Image (tube, grey):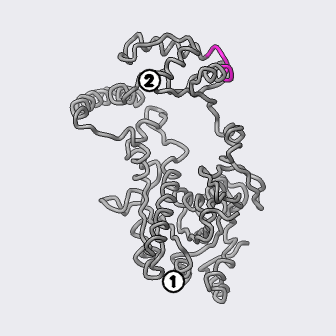
Amino acid sequence: MPGILDGIKVVEFAQNAAVPYCGRRMAGMGADVVKVEPTAGDAMRGLAQLAPGEARAYAVINPGKRGVTLDLGHDDARRVVDALIAWADVVLVAFKMTDLARYGIDYDRARTINPQVIHLTHSPFGPEGPDSDLGGYDVLVQGRSGAGFTMNRTENGVPMSTRPAVNDFGTGIASALGVVAALRHRDLTGEGQRVDASLLGTAMALATPMVTHFERTDPAALAVLDEDLALLRAAGVSFDEQRKVYEERIIPGGGAFALYFRHYATSDGLISVAGLSAGLWKKFHEATGVTTPDMREPTSAAFLAIVDEANDLFRTKTTREWIDALRAVGFPCGPYNMPHEAINDEQIRANDFVIDIEHPSFGRYSTTGQPLTFSAAPADPVGPSPRLGEHTAEVLAEIGLADSLDALVADGVVTLME
């Protein structure tokens, strides 16, 4: 059965993760996505290779696409670029802003070729402001957005970037939402348009509960916090201790997180528990027998002693035993999987959140599936990631350049799969 985006043609000028992940999500919904790579291949092809030119990261970010190669810097590349833009409903672009016009893939040029085109323009830090022209990666916006402060692990006293690259993949999903919204607008008005997405915008959106400021309460509290943090830093206090001070002072409901919304070590592994209402807290104590605390004093010695009591108690039984006990009273909980365990989790498999794909170069691999499903237009299983230059001849024929293929190959403008 055709997918919900069946008939939508997408050309992707992007490498690495964020915008290619947008292309992947659209391909999974039935769009025809043509990925344009440099003649040497997407940078992801070089990370953790499985076969020459084929790598793990590339394989999981790009299933279901067709692949062509193109040297965008070549003098004759413009005719291929223009033909692809004329063919497409959607153009996905992720280059430094200063390079877009240089390669002829900017929106102003695209709309002269195809006035109805939807042009997704991605920039790391957003299209405006002093850093709009800079290149960047997920780790940079983890730091800049403030989100990294609360989610990064630490090593040798400094934060480590969080993996997976949540802002890359979050941007891919947000970009797909922006594109389909623009397609809907085009359906209503006939107008194409530019859609801007950025890693920093995604990071700020994902940090919504944390990055806030309330004039009624925050200025005085933050002024004191800044003074105390300055003293701690001057004294060489570790990043983890600084973060602990911040969370105790600033994050609402911190005590509840310490007891009811966290991961516990069990006798054979870990368990995740999650309850943020008084009714659920009562169920937690019913199942565990842990002392009920005074939630008005979440930093008191008495409260911290109850947290220690819970830590000790959870270590006395297996994860399965605790899941059974907590679920029996209706308290939300579940297993804490390592990535390779999640792949075979029964619940994950039942919803096709992980799928298996067969690749002609290195065999079967498992990767994440679609996060969304549609009852009226289910997406068919996607094929593997494209081999380098696999569809160059096929796509150039579709966009009217079949007669030029040999010359373009001879001149090094495009390459074919070896």
Q: On screen, 307 above or below 360?
A: above
The residue under label 1 is: 75
Specify the amino acid type for callout 2.
Ala
Q: To which quarter of the image does residue 384 belong?
A: bottom right
Could you give the CA–CA distance between mark 2 and mark 1, rounded to whole angstroms? Answer: 62 Å
Q: Of callouts 2 and 1, which one flags the residue occurring earlier in the amino acid sequence?
A: 1
- Disc 2 crowd rating (10 Å Cα; few below 14, some 14-19, many 20+) is some
Q: On screen, 113 above or below 148?
A: below
x and y percentages locating residue 77 in the rendered image: 54, 81
Q: Would you say residue 317 sits in the magenta stretch?
A: yes
Residue at image location 61% in from the left, 62% down from the top:
4
Specify the amino acid type for callout 1.
Asp
- Residue in front for this viewpoint, 412 or 337: 337
Q: Nearer the viewer, mark 2 or mark 1?
A: 2
Residue at image location 73% in from the left, 72% down from the top:
418
- Residue in front for this viewpoint, 189 or 265: 189
**Does dot 1 land on a helix, a strand or a loop?**
loop
The residue under label 2 is: 256
Residue at image location 65% in from the left, 81% down from the top:
398
Bounds of the magenta segment:
315-321
**Does dot 2 land on a helix, a strand or a loop?**
helix
- Disc 1 crowd rating (10 Å Cα; few below 14, some 14-19, many 20+) is few
x and y percentages locating residue 119 in the rendered image: 46, 70
x and y percentages locating residue 350 in the rendered image: 71, 43
Q: On screen, 222 above or below 384?
A: above
Q: Is residue 45 visible?
A: no
x and y percentages locating residue 145 in the rendered image: 38, 46
